């Protein structure tokens, strides 16, 4: 199973997130795609004054032609297509952030990326949406499933289901 985390706190976040979720389905084996609801979340490790985020997660079985590396390249191209510029400040506001969280049991530790995502299990804004669609998934390298990781998380983060889809974030 592939897990991807999505986030946006700049521009028309609701429209961006919904369009990105729809676009991500192209990487899935037919019938395997699931997407969480949108969640409004407090900014974490962001510059002062950063707006709240909308976050979501998708999970799917990857098409056989995809590797973690090829999917990561596709995700970076999608971020750019949705208006994300080059990073100047770490965790700066952005139109779209796509994080490859898990790709089956694959592990990577390169200059480009680390799999599974090294900070995902410590972030409520990641685990809450993932738990909605894959609560029983055992996180690679850990003895706990997503629901257990979520229930044991101690954080000051604020998350809530996004309920007003008539306005941008």
Image (cartoon, rainbow, N blue to C red):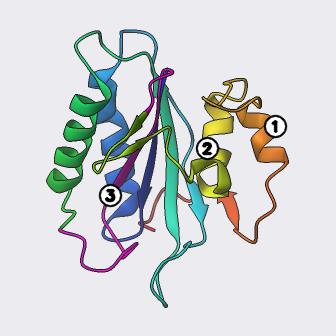
Question: Residue under circle 2?
Answer: 129
The residue wearing badge 1 is 148
Per the image, the residue denoted by label 3 is 96
Residue nearest the observer in this picture, 107 or 96: 107
Q: Residue at x 66, y 55 (%)?
A: 122
**Can residue 161 be seen from the camera position used here?**
no
Question: Which sits earlier in the primary sequence, circle 1 or circle 2?
Answer: 2
Looking at the image, residue 110 sits to the left or right of residue 168; the answer is left
Viewport quadrant of the C terminus: bottom left
Q: Main secondary structure of the magenta part?
A: loop
CA distance for labels 1 and 3: 28 Å
Q: CA distance from mark 3 to mark 2?
A: 16 Å
Nearer the camera: disc 1 or disc 3? 1
Residue at 84 percent across and 49 percent down: it is 152
Q: Position of residue 116 (x, y in %)?
A: 50, 38
Q: Position of residue 61 (x, y in %)?
A: 43, 15
Whether residue 24 is visible, yes or no, is yes
Instruction: Give the residues in magenta.
Output: 86-107
Which residue shows up at 21% across the image and 30% down it? 70
Q: Residue at x 32, y 32 (%)?
A: 24
* Discs 3, 2 touching: Cβ within 8 Å: no
What is the distance, in whole Å, between disc 1 and disc 2 at their CAs? Answer: 14 Å
Tell which circle, 1 or 3, labels the residue nearer the N-terminal end. 3
Residue 110: percent from left, percent from top:
32, 44
Q: Quadrant of residue 156?
A: bottom right
**SS at mark 3?**
loop
Is label 2 in a helix, a strand or a loop? helix
CB within 8 Å, label 1 to label 3: no
Residue 15 location, x and y as percent?
34, 54
18 versus 92 height, above or below: above
């Amino acid at each position: 199973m592939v897990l991807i985390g999505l986030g946006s706190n700049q521009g028309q976040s609701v429209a961006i997130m919904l369009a990105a979720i729809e676009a991500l389905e192209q990487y899935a084996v037919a019938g395997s795609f699931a997407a969480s609801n949108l969640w409004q979340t407090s900014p974490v490790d962001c510059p002062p004054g950063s707006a709240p985020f909308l976050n979501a997660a998708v999970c799917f079985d990857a098409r056989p032609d995809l590797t973690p590396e090829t999917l990561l390249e596709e995700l970076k191209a999608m971020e750019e297509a949705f208006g994300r510029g080059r990073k100047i400040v770490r965790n700066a506001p952005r139109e779209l952030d796509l994080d490859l969280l898990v790709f089956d049991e694959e592990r990577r530790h390169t200059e480009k990326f680390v799999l599974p995502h090294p900070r995902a299990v410590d972030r409520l804004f990641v685990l809450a949406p993932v738990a909605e669609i894959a609560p029983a998934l055992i996180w690679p390298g850990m003895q706990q499933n997503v629901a257990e990781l979520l229930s044991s998380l101690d954080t000051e983060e604020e998350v809530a289901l996004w309920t007003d889809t008539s306005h941008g974030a």
